[in-house]
Image (spheres, coloured by chain):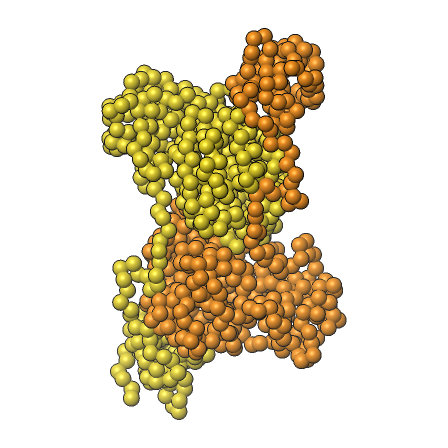
Chain colours: A orange, B yellow
Amino acid sequence: MVRAWTFPLALEAAATEPLFLQIARGISGDVQRGRLRAGDALPGSRTLAAELGVHRNTVLAALRELAAEGWIEAEARTTRVARDLPAPAGRARLPKSGLGFDLTPPPQIAELAPPGWRGLDLAGGLPDPRLIPVDELGRALRRALKARPTLLDYGSPLGEPRLRAALASLLGEVRGLACPPEQLMITSGSLQAVDLAARCLFRPGDRVGVEDPGYPPVWQTLRAAGAELVPLPVDGEGLCVENLEALLPLRAIYLTPHHQFPTTVTLGAARRMRLLELARRHRIALLEDDYDFEFHFEGRPVLPLASGDTAGVVVYMGTLSKILAPGLRLGWVAGPKALVEALGAQRRMGDLHGNRVMEGAVAEFIEDGLLQRHARKMRRIYAERREALLEALDRHLPGPLEVVPTGGGLSLWARTAPGVDPAAWATRAQAAGVLVMPGRRFDFQGRKVPFLRLGFAALAPKEIREAVRRLQEAL
Amino acid sequence: MVRAWTFPLALEAAATEPLFLQIARGISGDVQRGRLRAGDALPGSRTLAAELGVHRNTVLAALRELAAEGWIEAEARTTRVARDLPAPAGRARLPKSGLGFDLTPPPQIAELAPPGWRGLDLAGGLPDPRLIPVDELGRALRRALKARPTLLDYGSPLGEPRLRAALASLLGEVRGLACPPEQLMITSGSLQAVDLAARCLFRPGDRVGVEDPGYPPVWQTLRAAGAELVPLPVDGEGLCVENLEALLPLRAIYLTPHHQFPTTVTLGAARRMRLLELARRHRIALLEDDYDFEFHFEGRPVLPLASGDTAGVVVYMGTLSKILAPGLRLGWVAGPKALVEALGAQRRMGDLHGNRVMEGAVAEFIEDGLLQRHARKMRRIYAERREALLEALDRHLPGPLEVVPTGGGLSLWARTAPGVDPAAWATRAQAAGVLVMPGRRFDFQGRKVPFLRLGFAALAPKEIREAVRRLQEAL
């Protein structure tokens, strides 16, 4: 029988949807919500038209649409909701999560800075956004797109050939890498390089060595790919390789030999050769993350492990985040051709390829020598800031903090005096508007270790001095 | 004892590396290559300077560098290669792959078109790159970056808030989605949405339903996340849900209800409601890929499953690749807030976040109504091309091909007459400069099925007519 069915629909003449469609959607919506049931008769088109204050033809158009979609059927002289429609799901009692299926959320990665932090950031090795060459990049973007509109079409998972070529020759020049373009892949930041490599290389349960202290975000990425992490101690000469053999088998080792994260110490020459030899003998992939090569201040940068790899064991990763801009999401991975091809196939199952316009723009940026010039400028500026931080620490906190002497990196690693609780100090400092990282944030077991990490790249010397002053007050 | 060691090094005065460093690298390189061994004595600095034709101070600087890095040590009056250096790895006998570690390469995904294809492309549902509004996008990029230089800094894994807001309201308007911005995430194309969702939702061995015929690239992505795929038959009304219950348990179903890939048929109303109810009852996640919503030509688009989801079971994915440009790598995923947050955490373990500048530019593009205007224009153009293809097929191939009537999509699905071998025909057509896809490319078991997929979006009507003419000749 015909139940009384009122049809309260606010028609928006202004809406992009034509009236007839708004009506059709309103009715099918009522069916889905269960206000109309299978077999229910609809009011006549005249009644509906009057009720809605529209022309009858509009209503007829709506009914035709609904019939075409199978929501209603004409029967004798009345129009009914189709009989073969099942009962509607009804409004399910949703859990607070709003989820109708099971979900084990992935591990949350602790933010370095609390969201919306506005104080003085001595926490990260992050570069200073104020130093990004925005105009040059904007022009390069525009030029790249003008010159090659096809950059907006599909592209290669391995990245823009032009950028691969420019980067390959740059890495050869500056970092001693003998790397033809086909052994180089562009990634969306170096973390994607880690992610792709891990997903290509690891099977669940594979043992993978990581530096301790080290870089927690990468630990999560490696674990997500099934790796069982094995913490490897780090001392003043970087990763301790002496006892590595006792920890075998290892499928891979993720390490930051140039400026170890977070200590910034450089891996010694003897250890480099031992590590390469060990990797060759036991077929261990060395995931070398060279995230801030350019920022070496004492003497010259030490060349990557990759430059001395004659055994095809090093997977070399880097990024333009520190030297140019993080928001570019431009990194790279270099290694044996077979690996690079596998990484490309892996990427085709994910984001497919990167930001071709940006890649084209940065290729030009490198070809024109602008990247190298910018790098030199940044090195100068960051060297000043490093000096400023060292001086300020020496003036204000000679007792409580003893900086570990290293050759580079965008932060300092400082030992706290006995009796000083780094975590508590960092908390008080944050209340005073200064962000510093207690060592435990980087310890594999999260143990309290007597260290602070102090990043100087994001602040001008004046700001650094102010930050250290507050740090002292917060002691 | 002192072995005769000659030091052939081509010094480039022009190189970016200073001479002393080139010398240092040459020597440490010889150590790594084994030409110099631990304990070997080096020639005196005068000898070296003479041999290399450089000033002695340059050589001394090189030796200081090497000593600092631990490669050499001064002993009495002679300088020796450090004794604590282990024997060099030597040049390992590399396998042809160049790999020093084991690698199981991921599955290769068959390209639709052979690399560098230059013929008439009737293969894909790909849009026509010639129709991309390059200048408008270029300007929008420039403006976005000028207005917000911070777009080059780190950003949110969930995407630019401005784009999330613009897209959320657009989806509400056009696709009937009640989706606040916090339930929407920007991704690098819809495939990344599938990848992230799969990695969040699936445990190894989870059974996941897919349409058969369907979209092989997504099958690979789902498998890579551990899914065991269950093919679900498709008929003229889309996914057959009638016998679904017999195939439970299913953790999720990936489907394309609007224009099923590759058949372009639309999922009927009754099946939509059955599917939603089934999903609610059995907690099945419905991964709804609505990749070309706008391109519906007969009647109006049918609203997504997501618009009728009251049970929190639909994960709704879309892309701007078809409507605007594939190279943007801009897609989205909408769903329960808890899922979107999990997807964000997942992305923080991968590429971290997307292309913020592009996201900012496209946000403006939407706010200014340019996207909607462009969409209308594209719909007009593609409708003409669809007509052109239908007419051409009707004129030249009425017997061999029978087009399956559907309401939209950027391609046609045509049944081949008995006795016609689609695969062989496609091969001959390719030789004649026309690319078409035989149905078997989309069959879950790769069986020969009597269908061809003909995409019309990439070609102008004139090109389409020519392509069909050649297709006829190739019969």
Residue B463 position in % (x across, y down): 34, 25
Q: Is residue A251 above or below residue B241?
A: below
Residue A39 position in % (x across, y down): 59, 18
In which quadrant is the N terminus of chain A drawn?
Answer: top right
Q: Nearer the viewer, residue A158 or A88?
A: A88
Q: Nearer the viewer, residue A19 or A101?
A: A101
Picture quadrant where residue A399 is located: bottom right
In which quadrant is the C terminus of chain A drawn?
Answer: bottom right
Q: Is residue A120 above or below residue A341?
A: below
Among all residues in the image, which is located at the extreme top? A77
Residue drawn at 62 percent across, 58 percent down: A111
Q: Nearer the viewer, residue B275 or A319?
A: B275
Q: Is residue B140 above or below residue A19?
A: below
Residue A416 position in % (x across, y down): 65, 76
Q: Is residue A187 above or below residue A414?
A: above
**Left or right of B207: which side holds A134?**
right
Picture quadrant where residue A435 is located: bottom right
Q: Nearer the viewer, residue B163 or B187?
A: B187
Residue drawn at 35 percent across, 47 percent down: B108
Judge whether residue A283 can be spotted in this image. Answer: yes
